[in-house]
Each structure stands twice: as structure tokens, then as C-alpha cells.
Image (cartoon, rainbow, N blue to C red):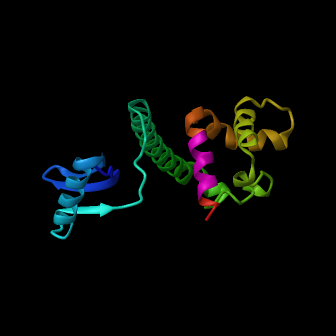
Amino acid sequence: MKKIALSLSLILMAYAGDYTVTITGKGKFGDELKALIEKYKTSGDIKVVEGVKPKDTSIKEQISNFFFEKKKKETEAQNARMLKEGERIYTNSCVSCHGSKGLVKAYGRSSQIAKLSHDDFMDSLKAYSQDDSDSPDIQNRTLIMKQYADMLTSNQAEAVYTYLQKINKK
């Protein structure tokens, strides 16, 4: 008896949704399976996709992928919340001096805050909060900026920085 190996990916329609199944049939079973597939593939109940290798993922990989996708969605949601918070803070506290995109040098002296590196941005806020310089010029700027720097948490400062980076990429 001639042995026939048959490997097909089938999409079976069911009440619960679509299923992809890989079946390998040999010998008489393979012949019968092939005849059934030929009979039903014209009815539209099944779709035959030939030449597709089945996914060979272990349960461990499937679980890992599930948690990876879940974490990815949580991170995306967290980033969206951060951007919204950064926009709210920037609009309410920063835009009047630094402009709509953080590219205005406040009072003609400060940096274009949107062009600062992450570390420089965070260090500037920290410096305003801690500055006790005797220079009148530094004191005047510090008095204006100190109140804003003091009220921001590190997470809020991150949110503002992230927001500025996003709006300046457009």
C-alpha cells in the first residue's frame, strides 16, 4: 500500500470562531482525509491553505507571548496617560513663558526647554528648586521658576519632558 503524507493547515469555522489546525495524515487515513477536504473545501465550510508551516510554539512560548502583549498594552496605556498629564501641566504652567512647543527662551534668557536633553531638563528643574545664588539676575529667574520647579514631582517632570519631545517630533 502506498503511503501518502498529507499536511494541511485548515481554518475550521465554528460557533466560537475560526480555528487553525494542522493535520498530518498517512496511508489510508491520509487518503480519506484528503478526500474529505476536497469534498468540503468547495462548500465554503473550510479553507485550505497549502504550503504553510504550522507555528511550532510551546505552551511556555504562548504564555510568554500572552504576557508580553498584555504588558505592551499596559505600557501603551501608561504612556498615553503620561502624555495627557504632560500636556495638562505644560499648558497650565509652562506655555506662557516657553511657548506652545517649548522653543521660546523665557525672558530671552532661558534655554529652549524642548531642545534640552532629558538629563539637562531634569537637572535644570532641580537647579531652580535648589538655587540660592547671590546674583540678582539668577535670583529673579529663580524666583519665577522656583515655584513651578518646586511643585513638580519627578513623574510630572518626566511627563512634561515626554510631552515636549512628542509635540516637537511632528
* Residue 48 falls within the magenta-colored stretch: no
Residue drawn 37% across and 61% down? 50
Main SS type for the magenta part? helix
Q: Residue furthest bottom?
A: 42
Left or right placement of residue 9 versus residue 90 in this view: left
Position of residue 59 relative to residue 164, above or below, is above
Left or right placement of residue 132 versus residue 77 in this view: right
Task: Give the x, y percent position of residue 169.
Answer: 64, 61
Q: Residue furthest front?
A: 1
Instruction: Using the image as rendered, state which of residue 122 and residue 41 is in the foreground.
Output: 41
To which quarter of the image does residue 31 belong? bottom left
Badge count: 0
Left or right placement of residue 44 versus residue 113 in this view: left
Q: Residue furthest right?
A: 135
Task: Give the x, y percent position of residue 30.
Answer: 26, 51
Left or right placement of residue 64 versus residue 99 in this view: left
Instruction: Using the image as rendered, state which of residue 62 and residue 20 is in the foreground.
Output: 20
Position of residue 134 relative to residue 80, above or below, is above
Task: Give the x, y percent position of residue 95.
Answer: 60, 56
Residue drawn 80% across and 53% down? 109
Q: Which residues are magenta?
A: 158-166
Residue drawn 47% across and 41% down? 75
Instruction: Using the image as rendered, state which of residue 7 and residue 138 is in the foreground.
Output: 7
To which quarter of the image does residue 155 belong? top right
Task: Give the x, y percent position of residue 10.
Answer: 28, 55
Tell me the quarter of the image containing the C terminus. bottom right
To which quarter of the image does residue 124 belong? top right
